[in-house]
Amino acid sequence: MAISLTEAAASRVEKFLANRGKGIGLRLGVKTTGCSGMAYTLEFVDDMQPEDMAFDSHGVKVIVDPKSLAYIDGTELDFTKEGLNEGFKFNNPNVKDECGCGESFTV
Amino acid sequence: MALLQISEPGQSAAPHQHKLAVGIDLGTTNSLVATVRSGMSSVLIDDNGHALLPSVVRYLEDGYVEVGYEAQAAQSIDPANTIISAKRFMGRSLAEIDVSTQPYHFVETPSSSEKMVQIQTRSGVKSAVEISAEILKSLKKRAEKSLGGDLVGAVITVPAYFDEAQRQATKDAARLAGLNVLRLLNEPTAAAVAYGLDNGVEGTYVIYDLGGGTFDVSILKLSRGVFEVLSTNGDSALGGDDFDRRIFCWVLEQSNCKPLNVNDTRLILTKAREAKEWLTDHANAQITSVLSTGEVIDLTLSAKKFNELTQTLVVKTLNPTKKALRDAGLTINDIKGVVMVGGATRMPQIRLAVADFFKQTPLTNLDPDKLVALGAAIQANTLAGNKSDADLLLLDVIPLSLGLETMGGLVEKVIPRNSTLPIARAQEFTTFKDGQTAMSIHVLQGERELVTDCRSLAKFELRGIPPMVAGSARIRVTFTVDADGLLSVSAREMTTNIEANVVVKPSYGLSEEQILIMLQSSFVAAKTDKQARALAEAKVEATSLILAIEAALQQDSALLTPSESEAILASLTSLQSLSNGQDSHAIHQATEALNAVTETFAAKRMDASVSHALTGKDVAKLDL
């Protein structure tokens, strides 16, 4: 059971957290919306919940709630550039199918 | 697969519902677009890695339009169809600009509704709004490509001194470009937001903005998260380009060149700019070039010499700075921080001069070229709803002045336009007639001097004023506009504390077009308005004097000799007939004449009332 960040993603998250001036880490999660079942969420974390699981990856604290973990266990979060666009990308081994744009998925 | 950004806790967007918003710095020389990603504001670059987009638009054959660097390159070969600095024409009429210095073919507009300057290009007649729209379109395209989706809106920055017509023109340009304007933000405010001053200590800040061709200095006051522009000043013909020109002249002097042709001029100017930029962190700059005449230029410019050459330019920026401080009624001790904006503020001599003037180190750690766009992006992100409500900034202004009707159908402005919301202003008014017990409060909106030319918002009455001599009642009228633009007006008689009030929505039912038309008419009608005001004031003065004299005659005509009485009556009749006419000057003169003729009468009345009061009384018993 683990969630990890690539080095590029970790350095970005560190930079964004520093810029924000507060926050203890990064929350990865899923919620049941979207065109194909589940959607990823990516948020800054100010407070941890008692049930939250925490992982350390390249010095960044990654926080996941246990319900979400079932869907994204083994995921590696990457930071990439596509043309002029840049952002985070979930490499989730559990995904069976995703919608055309990749914003939502099914397991 | 779509790329995700980090959201604030609990603010994750549903798929395909990202609220993409950008901040745009629509500059005179260069424009930029920025956005907030993963909580961090950053400027978006184009395919070639450029952050800046030169604010240059070139109209080509077949209706094709070039924007930015391509257009800039064509500036000297196709000047009539390549428009630079269109921002200077925004919301301006032909009469307001110096046509002689511009290479364009300006067009007179016959219709009175379109007052803005128009330029004849090979693609037809273009207004500054359309030209600016091309720049905005280009930035919008860049943003959508970078963010991978449609924009919900944009915050566009404007100079703090922009009037309503110029702001409206900016909004129209955005609409033409298909951008939803979330808000127009003052450039100095955007710069302050970029430094996070809005979350910081309350106080007064100076924004020193030296761009390519313009210099603006603004004094901002931050209180409770709201920035108020206290004063602005500047020089619309002073910027980094002038520093290049000083080097250019020095080069010509040193090398004894003959007057250069266009290409050589451009070449040396480019070398001059490179030298200027090099000197920012080097002690010496090498200027080498071969002119088309075969002449070789090889010079070394030291930072010290550069400082000498440009000393007068640096001083030129400090004079408007002093004026802005004076207008705000402040001294350098009141200034909490100084923000440097504009690429030219990278020059060490500028930073030194500013630090020396304000006796503190200015803020320079963010890129001065990008500051305004970064701040606008932060504001856009908040307005688009990507942050929790608690962080929402209140930075809005009143589009048109709010005021009251006074005697003679005149409008007394209580809250001037462009005041920041929320705001409350009170003003004292008095009664016009002896024994007046009620006052009608007529609330108006607009820039014109006469009630008939402004928009009526509400009318209410304050009753129960105790009967007093005209001018002695004190009625305090308070205008309050809350953060949502909701206006409430209350009137209170100060001796009895009786009160009446009304709540109005100022811009309700007033479309932006109407606002623009109203504003334009106020500029056009400024002269006739002034005359109308003078006439109305003269009439009010005359009427009040006539009333007073008539009352006095009724009471004390016995005090007058027949000849005095005759002179007063003649003068009174003459004023009565004139006061129905249209000649403010004649009314004024007749009023003066009546005043002069009744001077002895007034003195006699005074004597009479004093002796009446004293008659039969012992001086010793008088209560003095």
Image: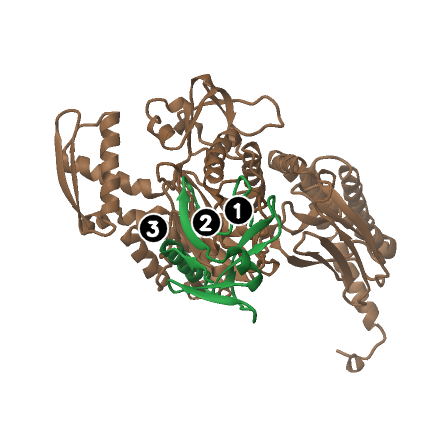
Mark 1 and mark 3: Cα distance apart in space? 55 Å
- 2 and 3 marks on the same chain: no
Residue carrying label 2: A89
Name the subunit of mark 2.
A
Q: Residues within 10 Å of mark 2 (few under 14, many from 20)?
A: many
Measured as percent of width and height from the top left, residue B256 is found at: 14, 33
Residue type at mark 2? Answer: Lys
Position of residue B73 in the picture relative to residue A103 (left or right): left
Q: Secondary structure at mark 3?
A: helix
Of badges 1 and 3, nearer the viewer stands 1
Quickly name the residue at label 3: B345
Whether discs 2 and 1 lie on one chain: the answer is: yes
Residue that carries the numbered disc 1 in the rendered image: A96
Give the drawing colour for chain B. Answer: brown
Q: Amino acid at mark 1?
A: Lys
Image position of A60 (left or right of B583): left
**Which chain is represented by green in the image?**
A
In this view, the residue in front, B291 or B103, is B291
